[in-house]
Image (cartoon, grey):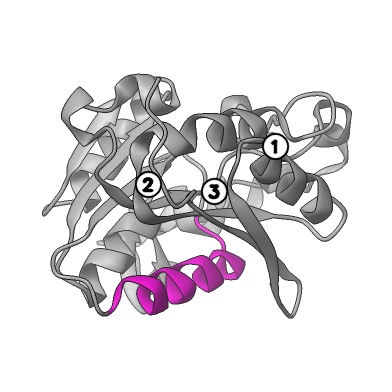
């Protein structure tokens, strides 16, 4: 793959040196395959994982019968989730991330949507409040003290902000769930990627916010699907 990507022998040597130093292959190549798409990946930006394709598959199932649904990709990183959904359905796409490098990367990928820089819902246009059909969330969920145990490709070459989920890994899950009712339409849904060990607590955070959660599993992937209350909640 590096040979195919390199323009000449000098570039190949530089790319091989980066990979040998532990940089993720996707960052060296400049792209990752996700849901059959080539997603641009910049140095330092979280590399989309194959396990996250379950979230995309479920999103398409939920939205397939709706006419141009509003999709928000929170903590979007490269924007891979939103881009993959938009590749399969005609949607109004919005994405947010706190990391300027991730935002720049997502804007390169999300050619048919809007990418907003900021912290979760604070980055979204106010006009989306109460209109969102789907909130897709692949927020950091690694407990802070476990980041040191991650493979070096992640802990050394992906920005810390894309990995650190707080003391128990669920800080952003609780915030995403707590804010969701104000942004979802009555038939809307929140989808959060989580881990096997954390799934029950992620679901509990959704229930505490007034949503109706259930846990979906496929191989090693875990996903919490939380439906909006029957009536939208507005602060």
What number is the disc on residue 88? none
The residue closer to the viewer here, 41 or 174, is 174
Side of 190 relative to 38 (left or right):
right
Helix, strand or loop at disc 3?
loop
Q: Nearer the viewer, mark 1 or mark 2?
A: 1
Sequence-first disc among 1 and 2: 2
Sequence-first disc among 1 and 3: 3
Distance from disc 3 to disc 2, alpha carbons, whole Å, reads: 8 Å
Distance from disc 1 to disc 2, alpha carbons, whole Å, reads: 22 Å
Q: Quadrant of the N terminus?
A: bottom left
What number is the disc on residue 138? 3
Q: Position of residue 222 (x, y in %)?
A: 70, 65
Distance from disc 1 to disc 3, alpha carbons, whole Å, reads: 20 Å
What residue is shown at x 60% (from left), y 41% (from top)? 210
Question: Is 53 within the magenta?
Answer: yes
State the image quarter where residue 85 is shown: bottom left
Q: Is residue 33 above or below residue 169?
A: below
Q: Which residues are magenta?
A: 48-64
Q: Nearer the viewer, mark 1 or mark 3?
A: 1
The residue at which mark 1 appears reads as 208
How many residues crowd mark 2 within 10 Å: few (<14), some (14–19), many (20+)?
many
Report how many numbered discs are placed on residues in the image. 3
How many residues crowd mark 3 within 10 Å: few (<14), some (14–19), many (20+)?
many
What residue is shown at x 58% (from left), y 26% (from top)? 161
How many residues crowd mark 1 within 10 Å: few (<14), some (14–19), many (20+)?
some
Q: Quadrant of the C terminus?
A: top left
The answer, for residue 13, to whether it is visible in the render is: no
Q: Main secondary structure of the magenta part?
A: helix
The residue at which mark 2 appears reads as 73
Side of 91 relative to 217 (left or right):
left
What residue is shown at x 76% (from left), y 45% (from top)? 204
Q: Position of residue 127 (x, y in %)?
A: 16, 29
């Amino acid at each position: 793959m590096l040979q195919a990507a390199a323009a000449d022998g000098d570039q190949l040597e530089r790319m091989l040196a980066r990979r040998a130093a532990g940089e993720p292959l996707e960052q060296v190549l400049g792209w990752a395959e996700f849901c059959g798409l080539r997603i641009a990946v910049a140095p330092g930006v979280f590399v989309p994982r194959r396990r996250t394709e379950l979230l995309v598959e479920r999103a398409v199932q939920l939205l397939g019968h709706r006419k141009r649904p509003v999709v928000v990709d929170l903590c979007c990183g490269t924007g891979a989730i939103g881009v993959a959904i938009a590749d399969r359905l005609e949607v109004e796409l919005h994405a947010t991330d706190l990391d300027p490098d991730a935002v720049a990367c997502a804007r390169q990928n999300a050619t048919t949507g809007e990418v907003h820089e900021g912290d979760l819902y604070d980055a979204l246009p106010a006009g989306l409040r109460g209109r969102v059909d789907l909130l897709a969330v692949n927020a950091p969920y690694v407990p802070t003290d476990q980041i040191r145990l991650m493979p070096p490709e992640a802990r050394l070459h992906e920005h810390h902000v894309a990995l650190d989920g707080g003391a128990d890994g669920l800080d952003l899950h609780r915030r995403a769930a707590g804010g969701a009712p104000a942004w979802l339409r009555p038939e809307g849904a929140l989808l959060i990627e989580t881990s096997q060990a954390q799934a029950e607590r992620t679901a509990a955070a959704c229930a505490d916010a007034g949503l109706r959660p259930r846990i979906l599993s496929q191989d090693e992937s875990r996903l919490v699907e939380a439906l909006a209350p029957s009536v939208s909640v507005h602060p």
